[in-house]
């Protein structure tokens, strides 16, 4: 399906450029109309992160939803997984998260969740897109049927209790010194408080949002500040969330960064030992390191790969009954607890293993050696370089050379005229040679 508005994770773009008040109002109207099913009083939960533009978009969406007769519950800055959870637990018809995730403050976005807390399917997004280009004037609610909007309190406590309940009842974080970086984003209140209530000695950074500093030199996409703080405070672990807290990166006691693949390995191994894996396998994307796959296979755990994007990971999990999945970026989904990625709950699972084992994070979170991975981009102006015969034969030769010792992934970008060439294998020099040969062939095809 060709999308005009929706990308792989909602609608996203420059605030007041792509994401304008007019668009936000129309999205509220269109989504409100699509999710009015039945005769009950319909309502929507709206959360946001800490971007300056969140005020503008929030008010525009309130106008849109109320104009089609939906009541609005405003929860303010809250993690994306909290909004998904509240949508289901409060029996709302729809949930909205106003966030551009790990992007800087200039961007913003609109993520939508259905009544069960799951991101929308392609078919539902298509229905909303069709309405966005329609004249909705005749579909607005009558004067007496307009919606109401109100801010609700207590939702922070609901999410904190939900997150704490994902741990065994008798497990405490007593004795652990934890540095948490909330990226000046949506989790800046709830996560430090939850960690403290669980007994940890908490040092918080990235908890002073001003509308402009979200994800700026902090959070999961820039963990250097966290690494420095962990070493400075001699902490046991560092936790870095992104702006809407649906992904997490861990830093060990030495200040070394642990990516999502290692976290998946920790959770998968722990859950298998505890008998909590619904099936002997987990779901990851084509970008997860081959080292993770080999480690899991040695544990009797399959790795099922999908296209890049957490929505594809979740689709595969739901379709085939797996309860753990994720991406190297730290977007980890545990469907026993959440309907979308939850960075904090993933971090808690790792903390539980650390506490139970009594071992340092550097040992707990280093279960395999990642294979050398080389990623290069080839830009092109027009045509389809991947259809070129020389390119095809070069790729086939590369795959033959790496057979059994690595893998190749060559894919066009979904957002720009770029072909991404990724190779990984046991021999870095061989992988570099294979990737460079393919990049050269693509370059010649693109220039032809």
Image (spheres, helix red, strand yellow):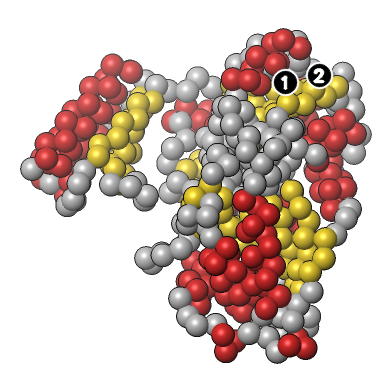
**Element type at mark 1:** strand
Q: Are marks 2 and 1 in contact (CB under 8 Å)?
A: yes
Residue 259, compared with residue 58, is above or below; it is above
- The image position of residue 37, as x and y in percent, is 68, 82
Graded by Cα atoms within 10 Å as few (under 14), some (14 to 19) or many (20 or more), the crowding at tag 1 reads: many
The residue depicted at 84 percent of the width and 37 percent of the height is 194
Q: Quadrant of the N terminus?
A: bottom left
Relative horizontal placement of residue 64, taking residue 2 as reference (left or right): right
Q: Which residue is mark 1?
A: 237
Residue 148 or residue 382, whichever sits in front: 148
Graded by Cα atoms within 10 Å as few (under 14), some (14 to 19) or many (20 or more), the crowding at tag 2 reads: many
Relative horizontal placement of residue 128, taking residue 89 as reference (left or right): left
Residue 88 or residue 383, whichever sits in front: 383
Relative horizontal placement of residue 195, taking residue 100 as reference (left or right): right
Count the marks: how many? 2
Residue closest to the far left: 448
Residue 341 or residue 264, whichever sits in front: 341
**Element type at mark 2:** strand
Residue 34 or residue 123, whichever sits in front: 34
């Amino acid at each position: 399906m060709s999308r005009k508005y929706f990308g792989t994770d909602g609608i996203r773009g420059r605030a007041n450029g792509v994401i304008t008040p007019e668009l936000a109002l129309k999205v509220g109207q269109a989504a409100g109309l699509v999710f009015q099913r039945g005769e009950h009083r319909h309502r929507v939960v709206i959360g946001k992160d800490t971007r300056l533009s969140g005020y503008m978009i929030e008010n525009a969406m309130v106008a849109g939803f109320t104009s089609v007769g939906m009541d609005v519950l405003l929860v303010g800055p809250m993690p994306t997984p909290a909004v998904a959870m509240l949508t289901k637990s409060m029996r709302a018809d729809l949930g909205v998260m106003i966030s551009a995730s790990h992007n800087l403050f200039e961007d913003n976005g609109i993520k939508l969740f259905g009544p069960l807390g799951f991101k929308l399917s392609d078919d539902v997004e298509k229905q909303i897109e069709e309405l966005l280009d329609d004249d909705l004037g005749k579909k607005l609610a009558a004067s007496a049927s307009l919606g109401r909007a109100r801010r609700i309190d207590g939702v922070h406590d609901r999410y904190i209790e939900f997150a704490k309940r994902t741990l065994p009842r008798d497990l405490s974080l007593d004795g652990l010194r934890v540095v948490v970086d909330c990226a000046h984003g949506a989790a800046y209140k709830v996560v430090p408080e939850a960690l403290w209530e669980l007994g940890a000695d908490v040092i918080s950074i990235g908890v002073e949002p001003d509308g402009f500093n979200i994800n700026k030199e902090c959070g999961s996409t820039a963990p250097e500040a966290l690494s420095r703080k962990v070493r400075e405070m001699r902490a046991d672990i560092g936790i870095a969330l992104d702006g809407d807290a649906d992904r997490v990166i861990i830093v060990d006691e030495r200040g070394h960064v642990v990516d999502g693949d290692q976290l998946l390995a920790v959770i998968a191994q722990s859950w298998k030992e505890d008998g909590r894996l619904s099936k002997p396998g987990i779901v990851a994307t084509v970008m997860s390191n081959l080292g993770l796959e080999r480690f899991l296979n040695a544990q009797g755990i399959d790795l099922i790969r999908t296209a890049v994007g957490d929505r594809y990971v979740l689709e595969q999990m739901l379709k085939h009954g797996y309860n753990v999945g994720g991406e190297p970026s730290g977007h980890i989904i545990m469907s026993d607890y959440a309907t979308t990625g939850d960075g904090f709950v993933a971090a808690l699972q790792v903390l539980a293993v650390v506490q139970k084992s009594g071992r340092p994070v550097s040992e707990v979170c280093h279960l395999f050696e990642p294979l050398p991975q080389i990623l290069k981009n080839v830009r092109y102006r027009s045509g389809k370089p991947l259809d070129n015969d020389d390119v095809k034969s070069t790729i086939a030769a590369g795959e033959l050379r790496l057979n059994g010792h690595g893998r190749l992934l060559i894919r066009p970008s979904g957002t720009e005229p770029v072909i991404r060439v990724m190779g990984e294998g046991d021999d870095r020099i061989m992988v570099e040679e294979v990737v460079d040969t393919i990049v050269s062939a693509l370059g010649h095809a693109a220039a032809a």
